[in-house]
Image (cartoon, helix red, strand yellow):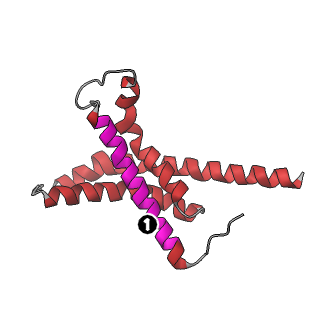
Amino acid sequence: MTVRPRTRGWTAAGWFFAVAVGAALFEVIDALSAGSGSSLNGRPSGPLGDILLWLPVVSPGVAGLVAAWVAPPMARFGLPAAVAAVWARIGADRLIGALQGAQLPSETGVVLVLAFGLPWTLTAFVGGLMTIVGRTAFRRSRRLGRQS
């Protein structure tokens, strides 16, 4: 069994890495759905059309699940990483828009939080929670298996 160092630097770096992986995965999943026609652009076609239609809906949950898995293996790191991955993606999108010259009105901040931020945060939290619960159940079953 490999033991990872428990220094603060490693934990912080691992957490930021988990957030970056979750945000990148979120962007990749949405790019896949947009490239083949998402629910906003019309119904996707082909053998995977029904799956591609749901990708924008489940992408925050998948990103949260993966971010919590990549984070240091404790709930106090995994759940915040899952939620932060969503906000990192939102922040990256806004930064890219600003660098390309997008001038959004100040009211869009409230709309962004209500329309995207809150639902995506809840979905990512559920994805991260699934990882934490699954990891805990797996550890307990292994512990019980060793004791019997």
- Residue at 25% in and 54% down: 93
Looking at this rendering, what residue extends furthest in the right direction? 148
- Residue at 25% in and 51% down: 112
Q: Main secondary structure of the magenta part?
A: helix
Q: Residue 135: percent from the left, percent from the top?
A: 64, 52
Query: Considering the image in quadrants, where does the N terminus appear?
Result: bottom right
| Residue receiving disc 1 | 16
Relative placement, left or right, of 103 versus 87 is left
Decide whether residue 148 is among the magenta residues. Answer: no
Looking at this rendering, what residue extends furthest in the front direction? 2
- Residue 100 vs residue 1, the one in the foreground: 1
Q: Residue 92: percent from the left, percent from the top?
A: 27, 58
- Residue at 41% in and 28% down: 51
Q: Which residue range is magenta in the image?
A: 11-34
Q: Residue 2: percent from the left, percent from the top?
A: 68, 66
**Is the residue 72 above or below the residue 136 in the image?**
below
Q: Crowding near pointer 1: few (<14 within 10 Å), some, many (20+)?
A: some
Decide whether residue 21 is among the magenta residues. Answer: yes
Question: Can residue 110 be seen by looking at this rendering?
Answer: yes
- Residue 13 vs residue 84, the one in the foreground: 13
Question: Can residue 123 be seen by looking at this rendering?
Answer: no
Q: Amino acid at mark 1?
A: Phe
Relative placement, left or right, of 35 versus 136 is left
Q: Secondary structure at mark 1?
A: helix
Relative placement, left or right, of 139 versus 59 is right
Q: Residue 41: percent from the left, percent from the top?
A: 22, 30
Q: Which corner quadrant of the image does residue 32 belong to? A: top left
- Residue at 72% in and 54% down: 139
